[in-house]
Amino acid sequence: MKHPIRNFTYSAVAAVAATMMIAPASAQKWEPTRPVEFIIPAGTGGGADIMARTIQGIVTKHNLMKQPMVVINKAGGAGGEGFLDVKGSANNPHKIIITLSNLFTTPLATGIPFNWKDLTPVAMLALDEFVLWVNAEKPYKNVKEFIDAAKAANGTFKMGGTGSKQEDQIITEAVQKSTGVKFTYIPFRGGGEVAVQLVGNHVDSTVNNPNEAVAQWRAGKVRPLCVFDNKPLPYKEQIADGKSWADIPTCKSQGLNMDYLMLRGIFMSPKATPDQVNYYVDLFKKVRETPEWKDLMNTGAFNQTFMTGAEYTKWVENEEKRHRDLMKEAGFLASN
């Protein structure tokens, strides 16, 4: 005969055991269960590409994720291809994107159905600087000599940059307005290609990021004239010709009334949960503690500001407004 008390006890123990097995799983924090796609809305060899691939290497070397991180360039449509891909991947936490200023400039210039609010903000990793570069074979040693030569060239000087109606051309327009010089702007697919074109004397100047031209500077092929920041860079390690990033004067001090820094930040696809966002925030905090990341920051002369949460979202909101004003002034808005 079955014993009712004994059967009840067995059933209760079994239920408690089952609960104990389920509870830890439900309490676990979220983490990727398949490879994470890391989208770059830009071409190979540029600043975003270099940073993303450095991050991928750090994550792999230091085993910071159980799943692999797969870097994918989607540069079509001035990065619109990448943004629309992530926008269309709602509820997919296995897709993240590194952003640059085309987060703002591409939708403003093209009118594509995308806005940064379509994505989920994760973290600002750093801010990237811009430097005015010339070929080292040229005689210009400072901004005045360069501008005087550009004026004498009467509009034939070629300024190379990444994309059209993006940050490089926005800066070029500001330089023209500040000096009265007219440049012929030549767009390329990425900062790596821009640097190659300057070394080959196919353009007369560029406004590349430090990280996109540091190799050419070390090799003695290009020369920095000024940095588009309101204060000198803090990095004092010698790079070339006995000079460091800190030795480059600000463009404002050289008569170019323009300062500009570019976002290097991370966003996720729409409808990401706080737990999923926190996973990536924690991941990038770990990335930032590695020697490889610190070397990238030093080599590329980055502004190392880090933001998450409401502070990051507010910063992005303000930057969108600033870019709208800059592009409206330059006549780059899609409605113009």
Image (tube, rainbow, N blue to C red):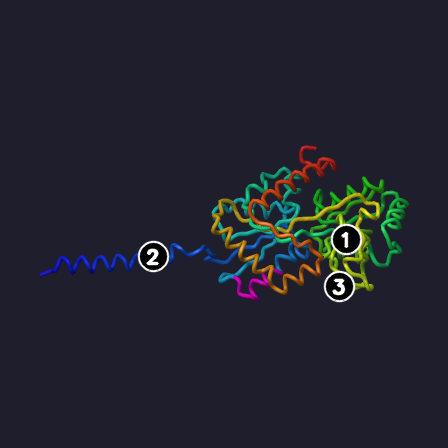
- Look at the image and give the residue range highlighted in magenta: 54-64
User: Is residue 48 something one can see in this rendering?
Assistant: yes
Q: Residue at x 17, y 59 (%)?
A: 7
Q: Which residue is mark 2?
A: 22
Which is more foreground, mark 2 or mark 3?
3
Instruction: Characterize the local packing of mark 3: few (<14), some (14-19) or many (20 or more) Cα atoms within 10 angstroms.
Output: some
Q: Residue at x 58, y 44 (%)?
A: 313
Gap between marks 2 and 1 measured at Cα? 56 Å
Q: Residue at x 51, y 51 (%)?
A: 277
Identify the amino acid type marked 1: Pro
For the residues bearing labels 2 and 3, Cβ distance under 8 angstroms: no
Gap between marks 3 and 1 measured at Cα? 14 Å
Q: Quick one: SS at disc 2?
A: helix
What type of secondary structure mainly makes up the magenta span? helix
Q: Which residue is mark 1?
A: 232
Residue 237 bears which disc, if any? 3
> On the image, which quarter does residue 104 sit in?
top right
Q: Nearer the viewer, residue 325 or 138?
A: 325
Q: Please, is residue 308 above or below residue 16 in the view?
A: above
Q: Residue at x 53, y 56 (%)?
A: 282
> On the image, which quarter does residue 28 sit in?
bottom left
Identify the amino acid type marked 3: Glu
User: Is residue 85 something one can see in this rendering?
Assistant: no
Q: Quick one: SS at disc 3?
A: loop
Q: In which quadrant will I find the N terminus? A: bottom left
Q: Earlier in the sequence, mark 2 or mark 1?
A: 2
Q: Position of residue 233 (x, y in %)?
A: 75, 55
Q: Nearer the viewer, residue 181 or 301?
A: 301
Magenta stretch holds residue 160: no
Q: Please, is residue 292 above or below residue 109 in the view?
A: below
Q: Position of residue 236 (x, y in %)?
A: 76, 61
Q: Position of residue 267 (x, y in %)?
A: 56, 49
